[in-house]
């Protein structure tokens, strides 16, 4: 069954993804089962999407009820779910308004269009982003992304993007030209291998943007939605130093819909009318199903104190992984994390591994054999992006499997 499905993929599905040879059938909570009945502990969370795990009964019920009531409604009309979600999200960030879309790349697109429109009258259009960043796969997304590999073969790209070293305020300052209109960053670089921005950098960026009338664009697609223990990662990073810090726009997707495809951008009240009537749109953006799911997810996260769970379990993971690093320094080189966004820099060159693949892919493959799903990043990082409602026992089970895998690899 599993092989037959994979064969049909090879024949009929465009080969844009490198897929692991696992065919999934169903999921429940933090676990998934493949078509042969093998169970995996899912610490990858569909790349930070399944924030309430798999098949959450309240999500399924909300989705079913809404689908029987109003499945789709064009943005020519009003409906309660979108108003409720916009209010709900704005209250968690600050005074501002929401645009709804369907993915992370589209949320980057909105922030880029916002900047173009904002700077248009003065001929400003350049956006500074970080090296090793990731902002999606559309033409604007790959132009904004600070990684050469996503751009290869797609020239000419969208004009006006400059990439500077991450967390380096002097580099941003030096890259500003009379045409600069915005700075765009991820609070914690995800695809780049889990690299959090520092508090000093964020405060420095806000001051620099204010000084030069630049928009500060926040890509919270992967690091947002309580993953770091607060709604947005700037709240986790700045903590008591937050003061009145706010970006000018915040992009969201992934966990916002918990698996239902959706994205959103919060735009500060000051700039909320830059994208006026007719300047942007999306047929499906913020549709009733998406908004119903997103509202339910926020309700469950609040009720079940999952922000605190993300902080506590995140700390538990980092502490335990640091102990494993001391025990196996050749295999585990560094542990980085903020809440439940954890990156483990792994060693390479072990006998049983296939050297034609990156160390991150080799380790993720070895972890599959032991029975857990994780996500590779960069060339040597294994990411844990588990559901926010993971239990301590499940986290411990994951750590045990991780240790077993390491032991086996270095034998
Ligand atoms: C920080 C960040 N921005 C944007 C995206 C693109 O999101 P999507 O794949 O939903 O278009 C991703 C996806 O991994 C991401 O991590």
Image (cartoon, rainbow, N blue to C red):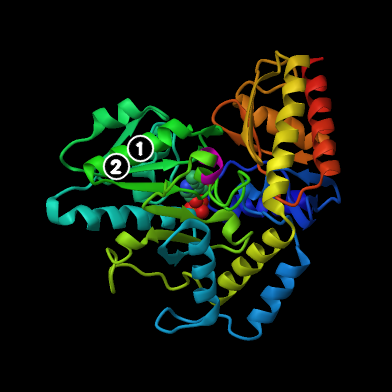
Q: In this picture, is 128 found above or below 321?
A: below
Is 266 a magenta residue? Answer: no
Dot 2, crowdedness within 10 Å: few (<14), some or many (≥20)?
Answer: many
Quadrant for residue 193, please give it. top right
Which one is in front, 304 or 132? 304
Which one is in front, 59 or 38? 59
Query: In the image, residue 343 lies at what x, y percent?
Result: 62, 32
Which one is in front, 382 or 215? 215
The residue under the point 30% across, 57% down is 114
Residue 156 in sight: no
The residue under the point 45% across, 47% down is 219
What residue did someone put label 2 on? 209
Query: In the image, residue 32 lies at what x, y percent?
Result: 78, 51
Lateral position of residue 11 relative to residue 135, left or right: right
Disc tally is 2
Q: Main secondary structure of the magenta part?
A: helix
Is 237 a magenta residue? Answer: yes
Q: In this picture, is 388 found above or below 85?
A: above
Q: Residue 133: give its label.
A: none
Q: In this picture, is 174 found above or below 5?
A: above
The residue under the point 43% across, 53% down is 250
What residue did someone put label 1 on? 205
Query: For the residue labelled by badge 1, is the local secondary structure a helix, a strand or a loop?
Result: helix
Tell me if label 2 and label 1 are in contact, CB under 8 Å.
yes
- State the CA–CA distance, disc 2 to disc 1: 6 Å
Lateral position of residue 339 relative to residue 119, left or right: right
Q: Residue furthest left?
A: 122
Q: In this picture, is 159 found above or below 85?
A: above
Query: For the residue labelled by badge 2, is the local secondary structure a helix, a strand or a loop?
Result: helix
Query: In the image, residue 194 lies at what x, y percent?
Result: 56, 34
Bounds of the magenta segment: 235-239
């Amino acid at each position: 069954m599993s092989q037959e499905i994979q064969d049909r993929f090879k024949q009929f599905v465009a080969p844009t993804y490198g897929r692991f040879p696992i065919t999934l059938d169903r999921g429940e909570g933090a676990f998934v089962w493949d078509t042969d009945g093998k169970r995996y502990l899912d610490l990858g969370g569909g790349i930070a999407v399944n924030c309430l795990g798999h098949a959450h009964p309240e999500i399924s019920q909300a989705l079913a009820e809404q689908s029987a009531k109003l499945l789709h409604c064009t943005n020519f009309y009003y409906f309660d779910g979108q108003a409720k979600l916009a209010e709900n999200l704005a209250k968690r960030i600050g005074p501002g308004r929401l645009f709804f879309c369907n993915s992370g790349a589209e949320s980057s697109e909105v922030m880029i269009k916002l900047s173009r429109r904002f700077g248009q009258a003065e001929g400003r259009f350049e956006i500074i982003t970080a090296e090793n960043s990731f902002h999606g796969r559309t033409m604007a997304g790959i132009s904004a992304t600070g990684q050469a590999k996503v751009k290869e073969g797609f020239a000419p790209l969208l004009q006006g993007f400059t990439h500077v070293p991450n967390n380096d305020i002097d580099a941003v300052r030096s890259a500003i030209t009379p045409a600069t209109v915005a700075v765009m960053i991820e609070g914690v670089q995800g695809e780049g291998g889990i690299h959090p921005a520092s508090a000093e950098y964020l405060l420095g960026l806000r001051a620099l943007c204010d000084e030069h009338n630049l928009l500060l664009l926040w890509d919270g697609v992967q690091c947002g939605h309580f993953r770091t223990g607060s709604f947005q990662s700037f709240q986790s990073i700045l903590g008591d130093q937050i003061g009145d810090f706010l970006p000018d726009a915040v992009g969201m997707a992934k966990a916002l819909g918990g698996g239902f495809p959706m994205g959103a951008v919060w735009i500060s009240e000051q700039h909320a009318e830059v994208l006026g009537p007719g300047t942007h749109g999306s047929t499906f953006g913020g549709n009733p199903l998406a908004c119903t799911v997103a509202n339910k997810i926020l309700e469950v996260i609040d009720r079940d104190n999952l922000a605190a769970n993300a902080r506590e379990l995140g700390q538990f993971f980092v502490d335990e992984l640091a102990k494993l690093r001391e025990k196996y320094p050749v295999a585990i080189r560094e542990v980085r994390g903020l809440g439940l966004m954890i990156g483990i820099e792994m060693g390479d060159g072990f006998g049983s591994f296939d050297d034609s693949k990156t160390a991150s892919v080799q380790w993720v493959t070895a972890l599959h054999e032991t029975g857990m799903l994780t996500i590779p990043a960069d060339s040597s990082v294994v990411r844990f992006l588990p559901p926010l409602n993971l239990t301590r026992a499940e986290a411990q089970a994951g750590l045990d499997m991780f240790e077993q895998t390491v032991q086996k690899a270095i034998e």
